[in-house]
């Protein structure tokens, strides 16, 4: 036992069975002193930050064991393996290659007379129409018989179609499927 500690040991007034071990007292005092230590200044990523440089290791059996060269939680550092860190994720499956689309593709008119249909949905600048009589064309099955319509194909000063309303249009074919042009809404 240290000479300075012998002067204060055993604590007066405590029964022998309740007296703490000197190592426990030393660790308690050390823990209380470390509670007052402020974290180092900086961004928290370098060798001066918590867990990045030297750390005081404490063992309950042997007391304070000195400074260890810890790297925080993993001891891997920059050269170790980083399992599960999100590296090399790749692109995944995605949606695959998309074919050509949009209102500027080359068109070929399919109908000579206007066709009527119901507006299924309108999504701001385009929508989908379901013709009242199915169009007989090999591309008709591509979108369950629904026909694409762009805002640029609306005539009569229209800028949008209302879902559920009827409209009249000509059907065209382009590389992405069937579409409606010269569309008049009601």
Image (cartoon, rainbow, N blue to C red):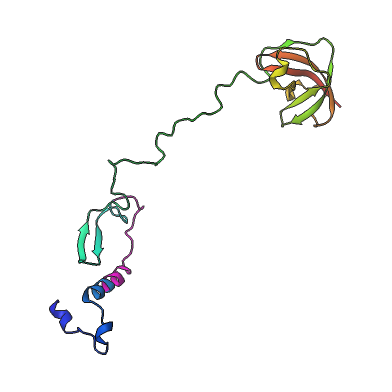
x, y (%) of residue 34? 29, 68
The C terminus - image quarter: top right
Q: Is residue 184 left or right of residue 67?
A: right
* Residue 158 visible to an observer of this rendering: no
Residue at 17% in and 80% down: 5
Residue that sits furthest to the bottom in the current view: 13
x, y (%) of residue 45? 34, 50
Residue at 26% in and 82% down: 19
Q: Main secondary structure of the magenta part?
A: loop
* Residue 4 visible to an observer of this rendering: yes
User: Where is residue 144, by image quadrant?
Assistant: top right
The N terminus - image quarter: bottom left
User: Where is residue 29, by image quadrant?
Assistant: bottom left
Q: How many marks?
A: 0
Q: Is residue 2 left or right of residue 166?
A: left
x, y (%) of residue 102? 66, 21
Q: Which residues are magenta?
A: 29-46
- Above or below for 105 versus 55: above
Residue that sits furthest to the front in the current view: 17
Q: Nearer the viewer, residue 129 or 182?
A: 129
Residue 133, magenta (yes or no): no
């Amino acid at each position: 036992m240290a000479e300075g500690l012998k002067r204060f040991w055993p604590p007066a007034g405590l029964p022998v069975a309740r007296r703490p071990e000197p190592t426990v007292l030393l660790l308690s005092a050390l823990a209380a002193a470390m509670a007052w230590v402020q974290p180092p200044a900086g961004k928290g990523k370098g060798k001066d930050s918590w867990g990045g440089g030297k750390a005081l290791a404490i063992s309950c059996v042997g007391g304070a064991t000195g400074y260890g060269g810890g790297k925080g939680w993993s001891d891997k550092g920059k050269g170790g393996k980083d399992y599960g860190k999100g590296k090399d994720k790749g692109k995944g499956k995605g949606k695959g290659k998309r074919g050509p689309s949009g209102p500027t593709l080359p068109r070929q008119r399919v109908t000579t007379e206007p066709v009527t249909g119901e507006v299924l949905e309108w999504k701001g600048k385009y929508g989908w129409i379901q013709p009242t009589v199915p169009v007989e064309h090999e591309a008709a099955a591509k979108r369950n018989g629904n026909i694409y319509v762009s805002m640029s194909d609306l005539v009569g000063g229209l800028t949008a179609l209302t879902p559920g309303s009827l409209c009249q249009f000509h059907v065209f074919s382009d590389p992405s499927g069937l579409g409606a042009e010269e569309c008049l809404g009601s």
